[in-house]
Image (cartoon, grey):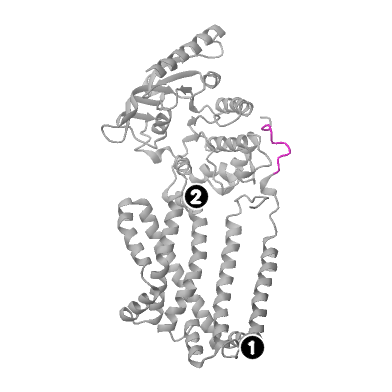
């Protein structure tokens, strides 16, 4: 049996280095920051009329009303579903485009300008275009979501695909894998960190865009409800509906972070940070 | 060596990179390697060793001439070599998202070996290479020597007929490299695989090979030596001198 490689004795196993308790840190600091914001808002509500700064309890009551009423809960769920559906559509289409661009330089030369052009088109323009082009409300919203988040997904997945290690590619290829096996063993794990980052970034963008889309064309959802609050001049309702969307984004981001912690657990954690 | 006995045959092989006015990495190279033979290819940096390696592994195709491995064209019949070729690279090329055992099992997985069987085989190879207890470690938690042992286990785990090694110990310290070389030779004897070992170290070539090919730029054989355990020290000194002369001539050219 070969002797143990020299210099290894006593070397700490990096995999066994305990990671800092991230969740408790985030909870403590995050709760403190949000509590500070609520306190500042509450203080402001003592000095400003309620239609500008409603009290925190008033907002909380509206929030509870949203989640205890079937109709308003459905509105919240509808918006969440639209965001996830739109992002899924943009991710699938963006990934296909990215792989095609990664595999064919000629295709990339055509696709790049189109995606760059698309990035310059405001979300509101897509709203107007979709209203003129399509009849179905849900398809309109889906179309708007896909068109506004497509370039970011394409560029981020393409970037991850192109960053794939040539060494690892050649090594994997030396085993003569099938295309599917190559995809599963090398390409998916390589692009996964980029894909998860793309989802995090696009989630924020999508939550902003979906409200614009619902403001104009929908008969339900957070955007539609916000429009109702604006017409009623109900600031507590507007804040409560905004919070619903924020909660949704935070919950999904938390899920993505949990996925990241599980799927990217192989990444070494430095004991010292900058 | 006659072609039917040969596991690897190069017939007037040239490889040109770029367009017609590009430079030859390999020019008119002919040699053959018998089944079960261990050949060390020695040469200076940029002499076309790695290009020769890539031609044998089928990652690139020759511009002229013919490469035949186990009676097949490694580039055109790429898929035929599934499970028949193992490669140990200069750097370990471990997948950072796979544990040591998963890295060793990679080739078996890609060859559609059932999961339990591939894991059991990978565990045996890790144990054989002194890495018992490190099965679940990720590459970043292993030393350079341990990572290279994992990559050797990965190459051997598929039971290759042909084993290609591209300076696998060059990035390691001398003591670790010496230990690994000895272990590597034992494994080669056990498996009986035909092996090509590329190196730029004369000492390593003499330690590993039973036959040494010294390459000139662009890859053409400048010197060839055969030896075994019975070769005397004086004959070995002659071989070393011949290698040195061939390498010096390449430098002068």
Q: Which residues are magenta?
A: A4-12
Position of residue A162 measured from the top left corner of the image (x, y, whole percent) = 43, 50
Q: Residue at x 52, y 8 (%)?
A: B235
The label nearer to you, 1 versus 2, is 1
Outermost residue on the right side: it is A10
Q: Which residue is mark 2?
A: A185
Residue B172 part of the magenta segment: no
Which badge, 1 or 2, is on the more N-terminal residue? 1
Q: Is residue B22 left or right of residue B251?
A: left
The Cα–Cα distance between marks 1 and 2, rounded to whole angstroms, is 61 Å
Where does the N terminus of chain A fall, quadrant-wise? Answer: top right
Kindly indicate whether the residue at mark 2 contacts the one at mark 1 (C-beta within 8 angstroms).
no
Give the SS element for disc 2.
Answer: helix
Position of residue B185 measured from the top left corner of the image (x, y, whole percent) = 57, 25
Residue A11 part of the magenta segment: yes
Q: Main secondary structure of the magenta part?
A: loop
Q: Is residue A142 left or right of residue A274?
A: left
Circle 2 packing at 10 Å, graded few (<14), some (14-19), many (20+), is some
Q: Nearer the viewer, residue A32 or A196?
A: A32
The disc placed on residue A47 is 1
Which picture quadrant has residue A213?
bottom left
Give the SS element for disc 1.
Answer: helix
Total marks shown come to 2
């Amino acid at each position: 049996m070969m002797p143990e490689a020299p210099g290894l004795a006593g070397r700490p196993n990096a995999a066994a280095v305990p990671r800092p308790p991230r969740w408790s840190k985030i909870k403590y600091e995050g709760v403190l920051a949000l509590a500070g914001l609520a306190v500042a808002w509450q203080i402001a509500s003592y000095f400003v009329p309620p239609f500008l700064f409603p009290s925190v309890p008033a907002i909380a009551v509206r929030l509870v009303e949203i989640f205890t009423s079937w109709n308003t809960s459905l509105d919240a769920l509808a918006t969440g579903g639209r965001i996830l559906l739109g992002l899924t559509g943009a991710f699938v289409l963006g990934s296909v485009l990215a792989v095609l661009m990664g595999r064919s330089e000629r295709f990339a030369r055509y696709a790049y300008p189109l995606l760059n052009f698309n990035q310059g088109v405001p979300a509101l323009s897509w709203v107007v275009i979709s209203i003129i082009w399509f009849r179905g409300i849900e398809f309109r919203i889906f179309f708007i979501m896909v068109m506004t988040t497509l370039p970011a997904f394409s560029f981020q997945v393409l970037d991850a695909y192109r960053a794939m290690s040539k060494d690892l590619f050649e090594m994997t290829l030396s085993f003569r894998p099938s295309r599917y096996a190559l995809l599963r063993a090398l390409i998916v794990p390589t692009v996964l960190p980029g894909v998860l980052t793309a989802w995090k970034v696009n989630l924020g963008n999508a939550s902003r865009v979906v409200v614009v889309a619902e403001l104009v064309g929908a008969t339900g959802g957070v955007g539609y409800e916000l429009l109702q609050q604006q017409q009623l001049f109900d600031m507590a309702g507007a804040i409560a509906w905004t919070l619903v969307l924020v909660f949704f984004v935070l919950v999904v981001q938390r899920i993505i972070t949990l996925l990241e912690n599980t799927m990217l657990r192989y990444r070494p954690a430095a004991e010292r940070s900058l | 060596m006659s072609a039917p006995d040969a596991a690897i045959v190069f017939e007037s092989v040239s490889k040109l990179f770029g367009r017609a006015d590009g430079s030859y990495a390999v020019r008119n190279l002919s040699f053959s390697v018998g089944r079960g033979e261990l050949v060390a290819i020695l040469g200076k940096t940029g002499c076309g060793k790695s290009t020769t390696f890539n031609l044998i592994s089928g990652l690139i195709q020759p511009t002229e001439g013919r490469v035949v491995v186990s009676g097949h064209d490694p580039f055109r019949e790429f898929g035929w070599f599934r499970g028949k070729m193992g490669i140990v690279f200069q750097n370990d090329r471990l997948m950072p998202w796979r544990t040591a055992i998963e890295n060793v099992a990679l080739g078996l997985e890609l060859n559609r070996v059932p999961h339990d069987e591939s894991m059991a085989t990978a565990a045996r190879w890790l144990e054989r290479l002194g890495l018992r207890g490190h099965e679940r470690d990720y590459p970043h938690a292993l030393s350079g020597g341990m990572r290279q042992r994992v990559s050797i286990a990965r190459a051997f785990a598929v039971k290759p007929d042909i084993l290609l090694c591209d300076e696998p110990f060059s990035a390691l310290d001398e003591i670790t490299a010496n230990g690994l070389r000895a272990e590597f030779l034992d494994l080669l004897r056990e498996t009986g695989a035909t092996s090509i070992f590329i190196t730029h170290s004369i000492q390593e070539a003499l330690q590993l090979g039973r036959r040494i090919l010294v390459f000139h730029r662009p890859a053409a054989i400048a010197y060839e030596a055969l030896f075994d355990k019975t070769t005397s020290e004086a004959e070995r000194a002659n071989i070393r001198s011949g290698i040195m002369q061939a390498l010096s001539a390449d430098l002068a050219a």
